[in-house]
Image (cartoon, helix red, strand yellow):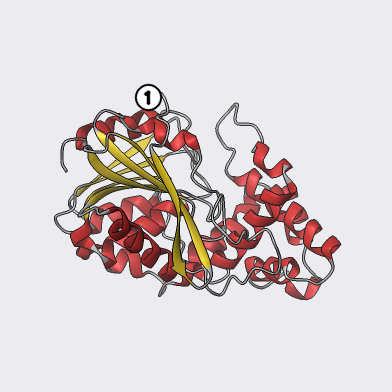
Amino acid sequence: MYAPAEPYAHGLLDVGDGQLVYWETCGNPDGTPAVVLHGGPGSGATAGWRRYFDPARYRVVLFDQRGCGRSLPHAADPAVDLSVNTTGHLVADIERLREHLGVDRWLVLGASWGSTLGLAYAQRHPDRVSALVLFSVVTTTRREVEWITRDMGRIFPAEWARFRNGVPPADRDGNLAAAYARLLADPDPAVRERAARDWCAWDDTHVRTVPGAGPDPRFADPRFRMLSARVVTHYWSNAAFLPDGQLLRDAGRLAGIPGVLLHGRLDVSSPPDIPWQLAQAWPDARLDLVETAGHGARGGIGERVVAALDGFADRG
């Protein structure tokens, strides 16, 4: 991976609805434009994302999606309205940012939730995407949410039992993401904090399937913990605010856009059949299943991301 390039420009873009989205650009101002779509939803665009790009060849744009990172207002505050934070809003924000920065077309790099958002954006604006590099690929369907919040209990039974028992008995056989979202909106701060801890403990369990992967240190921060739990449950309980299965059904809209799909064979929380099905419906995409990797950039995924981006660096 490359040394992280420091931003040469940054700002807060007013995207409406009382939302200010933080953005920054780094690398070569005359290089191939690229935009980074972070995961979570709600994780924020950390400096590590810059290291995937050759700073001499790319003009890299990073931004924090609504409500997270350095964007305002911050969704860790329970008073912040999440009704104006949906996939449709985020897709529109990406377009506003592209226009604001004077970019004609750009490469899209996304991971996990960022792959869902990248697919939604590219299908809505295919003429603005030069290429897609996606890893830990998900489409956030209702079935995928059910898999993560319920079926994964067969792999981590004790941890899942604690997760399920964190919601009232009447909610335990229903939509667990929605049940947690209700707890996170409770007027009692102690109820909200307990729900955030329980949700993030489960989130930390099902993604750590690669030997040596430790707990996510960000979950030790109460502010990040609350933000992550609020935003993720908001999106998951609504299946990403997309018609179910739309991203796979509309994969034909990506025709002519080259793509690289990188996914870990050991990614049990996001099974490899998701990118496999997408690759069948999108002939311009190449799927690389990495035998030693789970969810995220470990196990050889990160190096393959760099290689894919190097291959697209002069595409423009």
Q: Quadrant of residue 315?
A: top left
Check disc 1 and report its element: helix, strand or loop.
Answer: loop
Residue under label 1: 2
Residue at the location (47% across, 72% down)? 241
Q: Quadrant of residue 73?
A: bottom right
Q: Quadrant of the C terminus?
A: top left
Q: Nearer the viewer, residue 72 or 314?
A: 72
Q: Position of residue 175 (x, y in %)?
A: 63, 71
| Vertical order, 123 against 131 (above or below) | below
Q: Nearer the viewer, residue 152 or 110?
A: 110
Residue at the location (37% across, 67% down)? 92
Amino acid tagged 1:
Tyr
| Vertical order, 278 against 168 (above or below) | above
Q: Position of residue 177 (x, y in %)?
A: 63, 66
| Vertical order, 203 against 295 (above or below) | below
Q: Position of residue 56 (x, y in %)?
A: 26, 28
Instruction: Classify residue 71 as left or right of residue 173.
Output: left
Q: Position of residue 181 (x, y in %)?
A: 67, 68
